[in-house]
Image (cartoon, coloured by chain):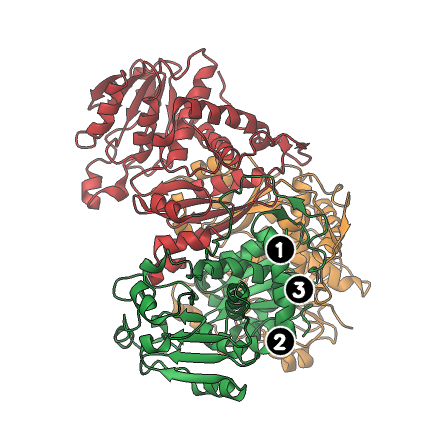
Chain colours: A orange, B red, C green
Amino acid sequence: MDFIGRHILSVDQFDRVGIERLFEVADRMAPYAHRGRITRVLEGAILGNMFFEPSTRTRVSFGCAFNLLGGEVRETTELKSSSLSKGESLYDTARVLSGYSDIIVMRHPEAGSVAEFATASRVPVINGGDGPNEHPSQALLDLYTIKKELAGRGRGIDGLRIAVVGDLKFGRAVHSLLKLLALFEDVSINLAAPPGLDAPPDILATLTQAGHTVSLHDQLNTGIHHVDIVYVTRTQEERFPTQEDADRYRGLFRLNQSVYTENCEPNTVIMHPLPRDSRAQANELDADLDQNPNLAIFRQTDNGVLIRMALFALILDVADEVDDHARPVTWYTAKRIPSVRRR
Amino acid sequence: MDFIGRHILSVDQFDRVGIERLFEVADRMAPYAHRGRITRVLEGAILGNMFFEPSTRTRVSFGCAFNLLGGEVRETTELKSSSLSKGESLYDTARVLSGYSDIIVMRHPEAGSVAEFATASRVPVINGGDGPNEHPSQALLDLYTIKKELAGRGRGIDGLRIAVVGDLKFGRAVHSLLKLLALFEDVSINLAAPPGLDAPPDILATLTQAGHTVSLHDQLNTGIHHVDIVYVTRTQEERFPTQEDADRYRGLFRLNQSVYTENCEPNTVIMHPLPRDSRAQANELDADLDQNPNLAIFRQTDNGVLIRMALFALILDVADEVDDHARPVTWYTAKRIPSVRRR
Amino acid sequence: MDFIGRHILSVDQFDRVGIERLFEVADRMAPYAHRGRITRVLEGAILGNMFFEPSTRTRVSFGCAFNLLGGEVRETTELKSSSLSKGESLYDTARVLSGYSDIIVMRHPEAGSVAEFATASRVPVINGGDGPNEHPSQALLDLYTIKKELAGRGRGIDGLRIAVVGDLKFGRAVHSLLKLLALFEDVSINLAAPPGLDAPPDILATLTQAGHTVSLHDQLNTGIHHVDIVYVTRTQEERFPTQEDADRYRGLFRLNQSVYTENCEPNTVIMHPLPRDSRAQANELDADLDQNPNLAIFRQTDNGVLIRMALFALILDVADEVDDHARPVTWYTAKRIPSVRRR
């Protein structure tokens, strides 16, 4: 697949070659993200970071990734501070905003909105999340994290054994990740969800058609045996018809250290797309795992910066110039090491 | 007129020489805005982009213009996130904020507020819109667009034939544009408004005293014959006493392709200060015109970046240094051409 | 004290040596803040400017300070645009956000929240205000202002005579300033508060244990005799149980020119942490003092930029490299002189 000048709207655009190219570039971004070196390859370029729905993590991650390449960021947050509320169409918004920047990241609460916006945009658009639909950079950073976590063990995505647990009905991160896994070979997938929050049938079909082994579980404990990765999700409460509907699922699937010790292999890696819901009644991933070296959730978000830098570099066609004129970082960074996995 | 270190608060400050100087500098900004070259002439300078009223378009346009000159942008959005809500005077706000940046753009919902702020500011202030009063950079970009659209036809602002249609009572963009036109020679102006939304008498007086020909129309169709430009405005619903008052005007004046074909000359240029209200019941400028090469509305917003770059460059006295050490853009920009007028 | 890589959470961390080091670096920042020179010493560094409570002044001041050192700023404003509202713990927020930037400034409405955040952060954190608790950079800039205002008179912080007036119960700025004064010698302090808004006993104890002279007043007029500095605070209305409780104190202590002339020495310097409440019924510091050359309130906020630049430079260990490769400012700055004290 070709990245140059392309919109990134969906994981469906990716093939295996594209993913491998992306990951190879992401690897090369590490010295910059981890503050060993700085590059100014995008000095003078402008990112339009257009968030029409609240998001701290994703917005700041994209913005930092662009800054780390030397570019500037102009930002919008929240629907109400936008002309959309004066009856402006997405077409008009896109025509106008695409005159202001070199590339746009857009988040919007409605499914399909970012694709509609991209159609009218004169610059490349990255989908930063369009409601219940897609959030491709999340799925890509998840997959990249799986690859990196397993690399030290001589294992890879081909042949992966993974459990995906929690709200598999509404979790867009999970849906996209499973679609990406379908591009690889011989993956064994445990899907563990409370009854009623099962993965959609089309996702199951995609996985089985790809020749993967899928097993369904309605209990957390039985679903997480014999896997390399357990990927936990929170209940997407905001997608339920009523809060009461959501409340019925609160706290049903909770991974903590004792459940982990009892059911997982000693090195099973724990992932989560974050935020995790740490309120007592929810708590799908307990804080008593925070010292577990296999908890990879903060390495995941760190990897998000690498993936987003790689997307920018590939789309704007500077991936091979990033290292030109790179300079060492000259300020204090001793603590600014990524959260390292101790073995 | 002199730009260096001056506040830009009103179109009343401009004379013809000043406008021509501004447009000449704006022309020279095109290679930077259209991503052929980058300049760092304002590297190290800071814009305080102070928006105490929501605005995506104007805020981002000013911010990008400053970034394109190499400067940094610090931003404030929305009244409630400001000390103004703790009873702080505009005087204090201005004294404080003007210690933080080299230049300030300010939008505020109250007429006269930006001028009051400027009195206390220690750095130049550009009015980014003070409620119903003024928004000078909009009028300047509109006039600049008229000049550029007509240039290819050997016509100019002197001798212009223009129709201004829609809500001429509350539209500040229109008021300011008409004031600027009064500085030129022999302009013929059709003012077409639904009864009750007519242009204020003082604007009419200014135009006729300048020797221009003004004709009044209460129908859209008759108002747009024999003109070089038709400038459409939306009903400024937020300025009406009640929504019911505004609703009476919804949809009365609608320019679409068939109205255009029937009444306009084949090359009449269509302008609009945006946002246009695309809700079915409003729709003062129909989407069926989007493929019409004479629709200049997105060229207008593109021109806004040039005008704002030129204002910054002139006020901060770097207009003649912009090209020093300019560098070519080295990232992907193939799609980043301005919306071109096909003839 | 050592600054490199350290969190700045409380004035309690500071000793006299640390303060003097900070002030010496702040002095060296003046040419950059006052736009005589630019430095790019932090080019490529990123500040995470995380404001989970509204603040224009402090947020923009920190952001500009970082820009003035050449760094980039990624920003968050307001609680609701944060994952905190999805039940995310401060621990998680800190682990994630600290992967995005080189240093973080955080404001949060809850006392202790920033310290909790810092515990989990992988990069240095500066407390930008944690509710009623601490706002150390404000106290440091206040102390720095005292030093600079008195320097021209051959007086210093040792031997200082200061009146602190207004709401001494809830004003965190005052509490922190008084703690810092306790580090110096032979300070004479008048505390003047309306009955019920007196300074907390532990602050009094700290001052008397440091050997300082403290006198208590329940009237403004008697409290401001024979002092070098009168430090005025607004009633912290948002910290009162009800608005009625706050209203009882409105307008009780009002410093204006005639009160000043009658009670202060001719050169008594007037300070205020801002914002001052200029509504008629509050008005603790009258606008008729705005032309008084001893009104130092805007010099205070200007000094805030110097102190914040110095904090960044010291924490990130670039204080001695700031002047390397400094360049002159080449744009218009004639008006951009700091608000000068005329004598």
- Sequence-wise, the earlier of marks 3 and 2 is 2
Marks 1/2: CA–CA distance: 51 Å
Q: Position of residue A171 (x, y in %)?
A: 53, 60
Q: Position of residue B149 (x, y in %)?
A: 44, 20
Marks 3/2: CA–CA distance: 16 Å
Pointer 1 indicates a residue of which chain?
Answer: A
**Type of amino acid under label 2:** Arg
Pointer 3 indicates a residue of which chain?
Answer: C
* Residue A284 showing in the rendered view: no
Q: Which residue is mark 1?
A: A139
Q: Is residue C163 left or right of residue C135?
A: left
Q: Which residue is mark 3?
A: C314
Quarter of the picture holding the N terminus of chain B: top left
Q: Is residue B15 left or right of residue C86?
A: left
**Type of amino acid under label 3:** Leu
Q: Nearer the viewer, residue A188 or A48?
A: A48
Q: C269 above or below B15?
A: below
Q: Secondary structure at mark 1?
A: helix
